[in-house]
Amino acid sequence: MLNPFEKLQIPPKANYTIDTMLKRLPKIGGTTVRDREIRRLKEYYERIKKYHDFVVQFPRIDELHPFYLEATRIVTDIDKLRICLSVTKKASAISMKILKEYINQIRKSPENEANRIMRQAFGRVSSILRKSSECIDKVIDVAKELKKIQGIDPILPTIVVAGPPNVGKSTLVSKISTAKPEIASYPFTTKEVHVGHVILDDFRIQIIDTPGILDRPEIERNNIERKATNAIRNLNGIIIFMFDSSISSVLSVESQIELFREVKLLKKVIIPVINKIDEKDDEYYKKIVDFLSKEGSKWYEISAEKGIGLDKLKEELFSLIKSSGTNEVSRN
Ligand SMILES: Nc1nc2c(ncn2[C@@H]2O[C@H](COP(=O)(O)OP(=O)(O)OP(=O)(O)O)[C@@H](O)[C@H]2O)c(=O)[nH]1
Ligand SMILES: [Mg+2]
C-alpha cells in the first residue's frame, strides 16, 4: 500500500494556467501567421491535457485501501471530490476538443482569419476553465495533501505508536528507528503520520509515529487526531499505547485509561508502555499500574528520553513480530 498518490502529477491551478498562457501568447511565433496561431492553441492544448491526465491518473476512490480512503475523507468530503473529479475531466475534455476543432478551422480558413479564430478559441477555453476553476483547484489541493503522506509498505511488519499528546511517542520512535520526528514539550507537535524503519536480525520493521489523541468521541476529534485514529484502525500491525506517568501529563490518568480502553476495543495486539518513568508521579503511576494489573495486561516501563527500558521493550516487540504470521514478517 505504498501511497497511491505518490506518483500523481499535479498540474498548476486553473487561473495560473490561464494567466501563464496569456503571458506566453506574444512570445510564441511561427513561420506564418497561420502557423503561429496553431502553435499558440497547441500549447494551450498541452497545458489543458495535464488536467485530463491528472484526473485519469487520480486513484479510483472505490479501490483505495481503507487507510488512504479515510485519509482522503479527513481532507475532503468524498462526494464533493467525486463531483469535482468529474467536472475537471469534462472541462478538460471539452476544452481539448474545442482546441482541436479550432486548429482545424485555422488550417482550412484564409490566413487573415487565423488570429481571430485563435482568439475566439482562447476565449472559449479560458471561460470553461475559469468556470470550473473552483472544482479543479479543489482536486489539486486534495491531491497535494494526500501526496504528503509517507508510503507505508503492506508487507513489512508494522508497529503503530499511539497515545495522548505529549506522552513521548516521537521521542520513542526517534530512539528506536531511523525516523527523526520533531519532538517538543507541547501537545500536537506531530501533525502527520511518520514512518521510520528498524532493521534487526535481517528483519525490516516499520514504526509509525502518530499524532496525539484526546479522550473524546471520534466525531469531536480534529483532523490531526483523526490521522492518528486512522493509522490505529486501518493499518495492520502491533499497537504501542503510551501512558504518561509524569505530573506534566496533558491527560489525566482517568482519561488516558479511557483512551486505552477505546483502542483496546479494536481487538489488535496492543502493548501498554508507561513512559517518563524518570519523572513519574507516584500517585499517577500507581493508578496506571493498578489498572493494567487488574485487567491482566503485561506492560513496559520506559523513559524514552533517558533510554531506560528500551532494550527490553525492543526485545518484546521483535519476538512478537518474529512469532507472528508470515504475512506480518518479511526478510530484509
Ligand atoms: N522526563 C521525560 N520527558 C520525556 C520523555 N520522553 C519524552 N519526553 C519529553 O516529553 C515532551 C513530548 O515529547 P514528544 O516525543 O514530542 O511527545 P509526543 O507524544 O510525540 O507528542 P505529540 O506529537 O505532541 O503528540 C518532550 O519535551 C520530550 O522531551 C521521558 O521519558 N521522560
Ligand atoms: Mg509526536
Image (cartoon, rainbow, N blue to C red):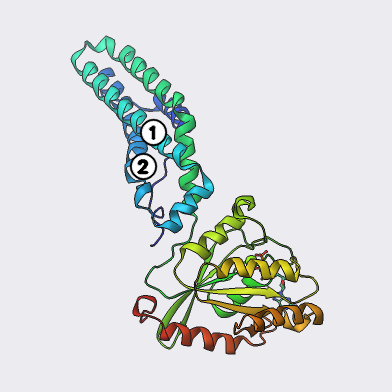
**Label 1, on which residue?**
88
What residue appears at the point 21 percent right and 20 percent down from the top-left corner?
A: 104
Q: Nearer the viewer, residue 67 or 13?
A: 67
Q: Is 76 displayed left or right of 31 in the figure?
A: right
Q: Is 206 displayed left or right of 29 in the figure?
A: right
Q: Residue furthest front?
A: 294
Q: Which quadrant of the figure has residue 331?
A: bottom left
Residue 277 image position (x, y, % from top left): 73, 83
Q: Upstream in the sequence, badge 2 or badge 1?
A: 2
At label 2, counting other C-alpha atoms closer than 10 Å, the crowd grade (few under 14, some 14-19, many 20 or more) is many
Q: Is 80 displayed left or right of 165 in the figure?
A: left
Badge number at residue 54 = 2
As helix, strand or loop, the secondary structure at mark 2 comes to helix
Residue 129 image position (x, y, % from top left): 42, 26
What residue appears at the point 63 percent right and 53 percent down from the top-left corner?
A: 221
Residue type marked 1: Thr
What residue appears at the point 64 percent right and 66 percent down from the top-left corner?
A: 259
